[in-house]
Image: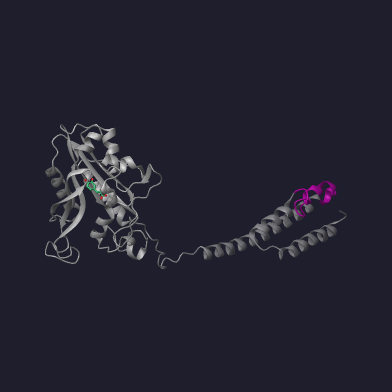
């Protein structure tokens, strides 16, 4: 460097170049990067000035150092000011985009709830659970033996016609009744037995009150000295809990091959309280389930001594209870998942 004029020219050129570049910088990140490049001690326009000190004549060194520091301070100030301006603007944009409108109404999320069938099933399980019943889960595919033969319904028995069966083969079928579970339980366990068995059953049957697939809840109690009175007492508790405190039961003689005697159980109409209405078809009573004293033949077939033990059994149609309880007049409504219907049923 020959003299100070030359130095001034050089520094002015650097300043002009930096100023010229400023328009290109459009955010705090580009300011940071450009500043880094300018101040780089090896390659930067300003950063590398100090390296040249060696080539400067001694008498000029002090002035050179002073001017380099000045340009450093100038550039530093310039970048700081730009950085602050960009950061402010960037924060403003960010706040704007993240702004919350606390007065906006919330987007309501629909909450799921239990299907009427599940509600009724859970209620029945709770009621019998509180009376000490255990749950046995059977299988939907059964053999002809468990579904019919062992339940005192041999091949040529007319009671088979009561249930139109979906056969899978000569031996296997879709169970038509959860009663099949009774046999499995009695084969596996010795009395005292006290179980309920919920599950899907299948019959070739289809109208407003019947569906090819529906759900039942089987009940079975086997012990010494069990009678029809025990059945009646237990059913009274059950219907009062499901339909209301003042509900009563009435047993009518019926026929099922696996019970003797067999009964059809009616409950006093919980809508008109016995006076007679549309629901009970003017009779004051509604049929709710089948039951009876376990047929000796069934006990013996499972290796239970029928001179020592006796039992009762019952079979509840879950959809039937749900339809009665929630005023549903077509069983299909329970399988169509139409929210306009299901939304009306909450517990
Ligand atoms: N399994 C019978 C049906 O599906 C219902 C039934 C009746 C079950 C009497 C029983 C019973 O356990 O004792 O129609």
Above or below for 268 versus 152: below
Tell me which residue sits at (24%, 50%) in the image: 316
Viewer can see residue 135 = no
Above or below for 77 versus 193: below
Q: Is residue 150 left or right of residue 276?
A: right
Tell me which residue sits at (82%, 57%) in the image: 7
Q: Position of residue 266 (x, y in %)?
A: 16, 55
Q: Is residue 254 left or right of residue 73?
A: left
Q: How is the protein colored in the picture?
A: one colour
Front residue of 168/292: it is 168
Say which quarter of the image contains residue 335.
bottom left
Tell me which residue sits at (79%, 47%) in the image: 51
Q: Is residue 12 left or right of residue 125?
A: right
Front residue of 9/162: it is 162
Viewer can see residue 287 = yes
The residue range painted magenta reads 41-60
Above or below for 255 versus 80: above
Whether residue 42 appears in magenta in the rendering, the answer is: yes
Q: Position of residue 192 (x, y in %)?
A: 20, 34
Say which quarter of the image contains residue 27.
bottom right
Determine the residue located farthest toward the right in the rendered image. Answer: 2
Determine the residue located farthest toward the front in the rendered image. Answer: 156
Q: Position of residue 298 (x, y in %)?
A: 23, 38
The number of discs equals 0
Whether residue 132 appears in magenta in the rendering, the answer is: no
Q: Position of residue 222 (x, y in %)?
A: 20, 37
Q: Quadrant of the C terminus?
A: bottom left
Front residue of 14/130: it is 130
């Amino acid at each position: 460097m020959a003299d100070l004029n030359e130095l001034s020219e050089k520094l002015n050129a650097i300043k002009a170049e930096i100023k010229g570049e400023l328009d290109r910088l459009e955010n705090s990140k580009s300011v940071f990067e450009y500043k880094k490049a300018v101040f780089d001690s090896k390659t930067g326009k300003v950063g590398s000035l100090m390296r040249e000190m060696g080539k400067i004549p001694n008498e000029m060194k002090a002035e050179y150092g002073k001017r380099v520091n000045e340009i450093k301070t100038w550039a530093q100030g310039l970048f700081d000011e730009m950085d602050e301006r960009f950061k402010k603007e960037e924060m403003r944009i960010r706040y704007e985009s993240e702004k919350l409108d606390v007065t906006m109404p919330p987007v309501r999320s629909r909450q799921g709830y239990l299907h009427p069938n599940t509600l009724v099933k859970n209620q029945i399980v709770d009621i019998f659970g509180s009376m000490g019943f255990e749950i046995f889960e059977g299988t939907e595919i059964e053999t002809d033996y468990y579904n019919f033969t062992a339940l005192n319904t041999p091949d040529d028995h007319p009671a088979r016609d009561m249930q139109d069966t979906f056969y899978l083969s000569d031996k296997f079928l879709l169970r038509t009744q959860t009663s099949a579970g009774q046999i499995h339980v009695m084969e596996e366990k010795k009395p005292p037995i006290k179980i309920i068995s919920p599950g899907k059953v299948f019959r070739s049957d289809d109208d407003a009150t019947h569906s090819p697939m529906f759900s039942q809840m089987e009940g079975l109690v086997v012990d010494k000295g069990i009678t029809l009175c025990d059945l009646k007492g237990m059913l009274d508790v059950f219907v009062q809990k499901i339909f209301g405190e003042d509900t009563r039961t009435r047993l009518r003689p019926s026929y099922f091959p696996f019970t003797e005697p067999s009964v059809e159980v009616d409950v006093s109409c919980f809508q008109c309280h016995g006076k007679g209405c549309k629901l009970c078809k003017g009779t004051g009573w509604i049929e709710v389930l089948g039951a009876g004293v376990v047929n000796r033949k069934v006990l013996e077939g499972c290796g239970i001594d029928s001179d020592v033990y006796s039992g009762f059994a019952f079979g509840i149609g879950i959809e039937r209870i749900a339809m009665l309880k929630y005023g549903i007049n077509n069983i299909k409504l329970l399988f169509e998942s139409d929210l306009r219907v299901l939304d009306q049923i909450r517990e």
